Each structure stands twice: as structure tokens, then as C-alpha cells.
Image (spheres, rainbow, N blue to C red):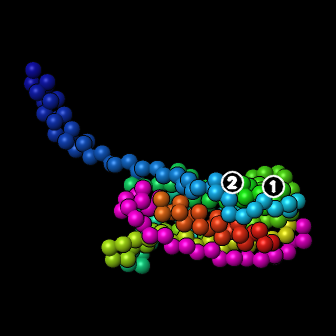
Amino acid sequence: MKFIWFFIFIFLITGCSLKDVEKRALVYRLEPNTSTSYVKPKDDKRVLRVQRVEGDKIAQTKFLFYKQNGALKPYKYARWSDFLATRLQQIFTEALEKEKIFASVISSKSFVVANLLLESSLENFEEVYEKENSFVHVRIRFRLIERKKAKFVDSILIEHKVKVIKKSTQGVIKAYEEALNLVIKDLSEWLYEK
């Protein structure tokens, strides 16, 4: 009988220390509106390959970042569903394919031979806090390369800041998606002229 009381006593003492359960991070996926067309279809027979998005640690992680008082910090309980660079490449490939500027738009994983390469470098992709308000800051540099001649064609820096209306993680994701829609619009219009 003493053994049972001893066991219950030990269980109660150690049971209290086992109750510290860490909150799991919520996972978010960028889904901008890629169904909107920003330019008229163009009869360009070239194939465009969208290269993987390059960048610093922001591009190569699943963390959502915010900037406050000059310091860049990750959200504790929020993650992207994919690596940001991978998801952005998918978004740009799908959006540019729907624009019908080129005969075909492919990702870097494709074995199809491409005439043009679209390289991109992610410079900013964070939520920025200023006093009581916040906005998302998206800044991406795109470079167009003629593959066969290994010739630089042109480059553009696209930057957008979109205010976060709803002060929640969902509101931040909505602002990112709105900023990406603006990036896709600018990118489409730029590529249309090339």
C-alpha cells in the first residue's frame, strides 16, 4: 500500500513539470490573385525560364520576418508552408504563364530549353512596424538574360509597400499577397516590352 501512495506522490510532483507544452506554429501559404491579366497576349515564340529566387536568409527560410526598431526578427508562431524562394518562383511562373507574353513559361526544374532566363534577387520581404502601424515591404530585382548568347538584356527593381489593414497574421498575409499582385503587374508590363 505504501508503494501505491509513493507512486501517486511521485506522479503528482513530476506531472506538474510535464504540463509545459509549447504552442505550435501556424503555417501560411502565399496565394496572390494570379488570375488577373495585366497585359494583352503577345505572339512571342520564345520560352522564358523563371530561375529560383535568390536572396539572403529571408529567401532561404520558412520564417515570417518583421522589422521593428531596425532589427529583423522572425515571428515565433508563424511559418511559411514552403521555403519563400521556392514559393515565389512558383507564383511568378504561374502568373507569367497566364499572361501569355511568351510561347511558354517554365521553372528552373524543367528540362525544356529556354531562350530567356528570368533571374531574381529578393532584397526585402518583411513586415515593418512604425509606431502603431505596420506595412509589408517587398523589394525584388529582376534580370532578363538571353540564354544562347549569355547576354544581359535588362533589369528592373520592383518595390512595393502595402499597409497592413487588419492587425493579425492573416492581415499581414493579405498585405503580402496584395504587394505580390503589384509586383506581378509591374513585372508583366516590363516583360511585355522586351
Find residue 174 and report its horizontal and vertical position in percent.
48, 59
Is residue 83 visible in the rendered structure shown here?
no
Q: Secondary structure at mark 2?
A: helix
Find residue 182 and report its horizontal and vertical position in percent.
59, 67
Find residue 149 and report its horizontal and vertical position in percent.
90, 71
Is residue 77 visible in the rendered structure shown here?
yes
Label for residue 94?
2
Q: Is residue 163 magenta?
A: yes
> Seen in the image, is 25 located left or right of residue 118?
left
Q: Which residue is mark 1?
A: 104
Residue drawn at (74%, 55%) of the image: 97
Bounds of the magenta segment: 148-173
Task: Report crowding for label 2: few under 14, some 14 to 19, many 20 or more residues within 10 A (C-alpha).
Answer: some
Q: Quadrant of residue 135?
A: bottom left
Q: Looking at the image, is mark 1 or mark 2 earlier in the sequence?
A: 2
Residue drawn at (84%, 52%) of the image: 112
Residue drawn at (38%, 48%) of the image: 24
Q: Amino acid at mark 2?
A: Glu
> Seen in the image, is 101 located left or right of residue 93?
right
Residue at the right extreme, as displayed: 149
> Seen in the image, is 39 located left or right of residue 79?
right
Find residue 158 and report its horizontal and vertical position in percent.
63, 74
Front one among 161 and 6: 161
Residue at the top extreme, as displayed: 1
Q: CA distance from mark 1 to mark 2?
A: 11 Å
Residue drawn at (72%, 54%) of the image: 98
